Amino acid sequence: MLLLAGGFTTLAVRGVLELALRLRAGMPDLPAWAEAAAILFNLLGLIALGAASLIAMAAEEEAIVRRQSDERHRAERMLQQGQRLESLGRLAGGVAHDFNNVLAVVMATAENLREDALTTGQLTEIDEISAAADRGRPLVR
């Protein structure tokens, strides 16, 4: 954008100089103040064009910076959400592992009790313990 504004400025200066030469050549009786006023008027136009170009470039840069800032904030939020999900997954995995260890102890103890059971009532209760532990197995997979 700056290069484009610089190109316009160069063309405008050249145009002002050509105008000044034409005025001097075509109208020798043109007062110097009129020639100076024409040149000054054209230079003011160039300054206004340059200022407008600078304002447009500043606005464009501000929009770019704002867009980049928004994208950075969005990426940071996504990263934080991913980290929270990762922490939750680790916690869930740890709980499942611990629960699996408890189930293994319950099942092993039930098997040991089954070998030592003396009555049918005791075997029934041991079977209920084993069945409950078996129902808990799918929870940790």
Image (tube, grey):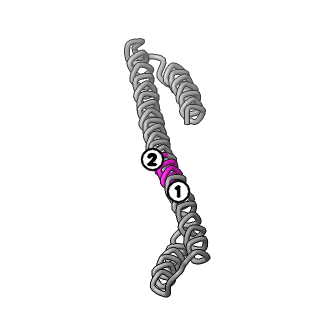
Q: Position of residue 77 (x, y in %)?
A: 45, 47
Please give left or right for residue 13 compared with residue 34 in the image.
right
Q: Residue furthest bottom?
A: 120
In front: 129, or 75?
A: 129
Crowdedness near tag 1: few (<14), some (14–19) or many (≥20) residues, C-alpha within 10 Å: few
Q: What span is colored magenta in the figure? A: 80-89
Above or below, 18 against 71 in this view is above
Query: Which residue is pictured at 50% across the width and 84% down the height?
Result: 119
Residues at circles 2 and 1 in contact by the CB criterion of under 8 Å: no
Query: Which residue is pictured at 51% across the width and 62% down the height?
Result: 99
Q: CA distance from mark 2 to mark 1?
A: 18 Å
Above or below, 141 against 60 in this view is below
Above or below, 26 against 59 in this view is above
Report if residue 83 lies within the magenta region: yes
Q: Position of residue 141 (x, y in %)?
A: 58, 70
Q: Position of residue 63 (x, y in %)?
A: 44, 41
Q: Identify the residue position indicated by label 1 in the image.
A: 89
Above or below, 94 against 15 in this view is below
Q: Identify the residue position indicated by label 2 in the image.
A: 77
Q: Secondary structure at mark 2?
A: helix
Dot label at residue 19: none
Report if residue 99 lies within the magenta region: no
Q: Which amino acid type is marked by label 2?
A: Arg
Q: Choose mark 2 or mark 1, whichever is in front.
A: 1
Q: Residue furthest top?
A: 32
Query: Which residue is pictured at 39% across the width and 14% down the height?
Result: 31
Crowdedness near tag 2: few (<14), some (14–19) or many (≥20) residues, C-alpha within 10 Å: few
Q: Which amino acid type is marked by label 1?
A: Gly
